[in-house]
Image: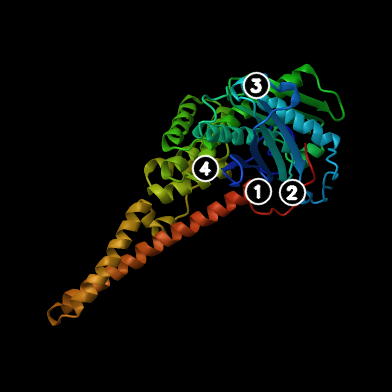
Amino acid sequence: MGGGGVRQDGRAPDELRPVRLTRGYVQTCPGAVLIECGATRVLCTVSVEERVPPFLLGRGSGWLTAEYGMLPGSSPQRVPREAPGGRVNNRAREIQRLIGRSLRAVVALDQLGERTLHVDCDVIQADGGTRTAAITGAYVALVDAVAHLRAASVLAGDPVRDSVAAISVGIVGGEVVLDLCYAEDARAETDLNLVMTGSGGIVEVQGTAEGRPFDRQQLGAMLDLGATGIAALAACVRLGCAATATERQFIWDDANTHMAAAHTPEEFRAAAATYRQLLAAGVRNGPLFYNLGTALLKAGAYDEALQSLLRAERYLGSNPEIQRNMLLALSQGQKDKAATLPWYRTILFWHYGLSASTRMTVAALAFLVIWIALIIRRTARGKDLAGFLLTLSLTAFIVFGSSVATSVHEESKAEALGRLKAGEMPPGRPPGSPGP
């Protein structure tokens, strides 16, 4: 890959893998989050112990420590379990210290009281970026654990002073790329892990030249790209911690603000990344798909834009704005200014001129009229009227009911395709071996 090309998984050089945060993944500890970054999955839990290490006894301060490990089946090549005596391999020791340092950077330990927060990060499936995913997921688990302690009146205030997230950056094929999967990490000339706070502070930079040394200009480019990626990741973290509709509305408004201020393809791609986080949180509506499709169109991702606009049409019904953007995506994607939408759409999909809610309402009303007609038909006087109503309502029910069924089927296919791209379904290749 080079010259701003598309990577092997279809992403742009500055594009994150799809991210999903599942809070409360297990019910046995106050903080538990499953973080999924593409095909990488890490379970992050936070447990509370009412004591501190000996060096903190009597000081009134708390402690936070972390452990990291890979489950045996997390890689195609079985990962051996740690020795029964508790000895940790050097790689795991390095990573768990990194996780602990990153979280302690945003926690006021003196507000914890004399108690220890144990953070455990277990890699379920590895496809690169396990340490950075562990840091980001552990932060969300930490937020939940602290909220649990405050709700139980164990803590009076919030000791978490800032957010923290981490991302990998590297040079692959001479080009700086964001969020490396295992296949890219295995052949990267340079591999760098960046940890930053929500306020923009740098917690840690780990950079290694695997072959040819990198220069200061390349280091600056990697740090800039990493900071941009962490900003997009921070939006996902905020959404992952957003428990109310008001908080999700804030994310929506924030995405729209970035969209309105965007001028370059990179800025539109960043806005699209924020809209995608709403999708990852389960939000589904026409305006979201329309805005996402428009952002992707202006970012130059024409095929993805067209698919998103088609989904917007299913929810909202067809309108001139959607039609215009669909034509633009089609013509730019095919590099044919004369490209048009298929002629048969008007005949076969005329009902997409109505929103999904309107079509569902018509189908429901038609079903109700069918029952009314059947009741009227039982009376001798109403047979003619009943026959007319029955024919009309059956026709409407079949047309609009099948329309709704078609929309549901198409949405199901789109959802399945999205999950496949996100790595939730097994792709054609194995997810790779242990990455960084």
Q: Secondary structure at mark 2?
A: loop
The earlier-in-sequence mark between 2 and 4 is 4
Residue corresponding to mark 3: 61
Q: Quadrant of residue 237?
A: top right
Q: Nearer the viewer, residue 209 or 113?
A: 113
Residue 329 — which label? Answer: none
The earlier-in-sequence mark between 1 and 2 is 1
* Amino acid type assigned to the residue bearing label 4 in the image: Ala
Q: Position of residue 184 (x, y in %)?
A: 76, 39
Q: CA gap, disc 1 to disc 4?
A: 16 Å
Residue 423 — which label? Answer: 1
Q: Secondary structure at mark 4?
A: loop
Which is more foreground, mark 2 or mark 4? 4
Q: Position of residue 52 (x, y in %)?
A: 70, 28
Q: Quadrant of residue 435?
A: top right
The earlier-in-sequence mark between 3 and 1 is 3
* Amino acid type assigned to the residue bearing label 2 in the image: Pro
Q: Position of residue 416 (x, y in %)?
A: 57, 54
The reply to whether callout 3 and callout 1 are in contact (CB within 8 Å) is: no
Residue corresponding to mark 2: 431
The quadrant the C terminus occupies is top right
The earlier-in-sequence mark between 3 and 2 is 3
Q: CA gap, disc 3 to disc 2?
A: 42 Å
Which is more foreground, mark 3 or mark 2? 3
The earlier-in-sequence mark between 1 and 4 is 4
Residue 175: tell me if it is visible: no
Q: Position of residue 191 (x, y in %)?
A: 78, 30
Task: Name the colour scheme.
Answer: rainbow
* Amino acid type assigned to the residue bearing label 3 in the image: Ser
